[in-house]
Image: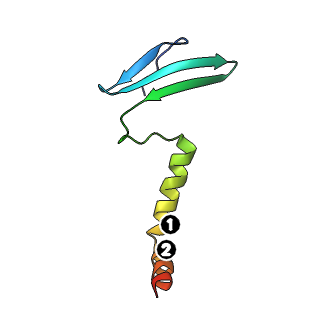
């Protein structure tokens, strides 16, 4: 993991097309702005993990059986 220090209004670049800017710092909370192409999905980690879990459930044997029952 790369750890970087940034101040308000400073940014980092990822590749040539993703920019992360520190917008605000209040106590222990940091507000970030992310500029990325539309085809690059950006999620909070907890949302990403929920999506991954839902995808795994949907492709499990139980999920496939539920899909078969739904389609008749």
- Residue 34 in the image: state x and y as whole percent: 46, 28
On residue 63, the disc is: 2
Q: 32 left or right of 12? A: right
Q: Secondary structure at mark 2?
A: helix
Image spot of residue 60 (x, y percent):
46, 71
Q: Is residue 36 above or below residue 67?
A: above
Which residue is depicted at the point 52% across and 50% down?
49
**Numbered tag placed on residue 67 in the rendering:** none
Q: Quadrant of residue 64?
A: bottom left
Q: Earlier in the sequence, mark 1 or mark 2?
A: 1
Looking at the image, is 67 positioned above or below residue 9?
below
**Colour mode?**
rainbow
Q: Residues within 10 Å of mark 2 (few under 14, many from 20)?
A: some
Crowd class of label 1 (few under 14; some 14 to 19; many from 20; radius 10 Å): few
Q: Residue furthest bottom?
A: 72
Q: Which residue is mark 1?
A: 57
Pick out the residue farthest to the right: 27
How many numbered marks, from 0 up? Answer: 2
| Secondary structure category for the residue under label 1 | helix
Expressed as whole percent of the image width and height from the top left, the position of residue 16 reads: 29, 25
Is residue 62 placed above or below 32 in the rendered structure?
A: below
Q: Position of residue 44 (x, y in %)?
A: 54, 40
Picture layout, residue 44 above or below residue 63: above
Location of the N terminus (image quadrant): top left
Of the pair 24 and 48, the residue shown nearer to us:
24
- Residues at badges 1 and 2 in contact (C-beta under 8 Å)? yes
Residue drawn at the location 42% of the way across and 42% of the way down: 41
Spatial CA span between label 1 and label 2? 6 Å
Q: Residue at x 49, y 74 (%)?
A: 63
């Amino acid at each position: 993991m790369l750890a970087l220090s940034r101040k308000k209004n400073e940014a980092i670049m990822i590749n040539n097309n993703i920019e992360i800017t520190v917008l605000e710092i209040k106590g222990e909370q940091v507000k970030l702005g992310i500029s990325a192409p539309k085809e690059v999905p950006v999620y909070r980690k907890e949302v990403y993990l929920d999506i991954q879990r839902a995808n795994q459930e949907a492709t499990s044997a139980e999920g496939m059986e539920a899909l078969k029952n739904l389609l008749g």
